Image (tube, rainbow, N blue to C red):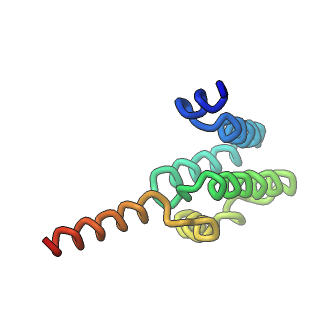
Amino acid sequence: MAKNILELVIGSIDDKKQWRAYKARVKALPENYRTAVDAIERYLMHSGDTPADWSRAAVMFDDLADLFERAAADETPIRDIVGDTPVEFVDEFVKTYSDGGWIAKERERLTRSIDKAAES
């Protein structure tokens, strides 16, 4: 019971543990790989394309960490991972996981509101 009340106030504890585990994995990367992942993460958080559903986002971030952990282990150059246009790389990467993110929900909300207003 207390866990349910606590989660209602602060959100899922398991989700927070999963996020912290992801961040710990990123922190363990060599500096240049960590810098690249941090930049990709920032872009994802600001782009509006990050999945709104946490379970999809968690898989996406775990896969991002996997990708860079393998690349670091193999000493794959960062440009070999993201190419010459990092924005295109990230946009293609997120498409695999995207549920439209918050921007899709806002577009849907706008359309519904305009439809409702037009009916009046």
Residue 109: image location, x then y, percent: 33, 63
Q: Nearer the viewer, residue 107 or 67?
A: 107
Furthest residue to the left? 120
Q: Residue 112's image quarter?
A: bottom left
Q: In the picture provided, is 104 more to the left or to the right than 58? A: left
Q: Residue 80's image quarter?
A: bottom right
| Above or below: residue 42 compared with residue 91 | above
Q: Nearer the viewer, residue 9 or 63?
A: 9
Total numbered circles: 0
Residue 75: image location, x then y, percent: 83, 55
Residue 76: image location, x then y, percent: 79, 59
Q: Residue at x 17, y 68 (%)?
A: 117
Q: Residue at x 16, y 74 (%)?
A: 118
**Screen quadrant of the C terminus:** bottom left
**Screen quadrant of the N terminus:** top right
Furthest residue to the front? 1
Q: Residue at x 55, y 67 (%)?
A: 91
Q: Nearer the viewer, residue 119 or 19?
A: 119
Q: In the picture provided, is 74 more to the left or to the right than 105? A: right
Residue 54: image location, x then y, percent: 61, 51
Q: Residue 110's image quarter?
A: bottom left
Q: Residue at x 36, y 61 (%)?
A: 106
Furthest residue to the right? 74
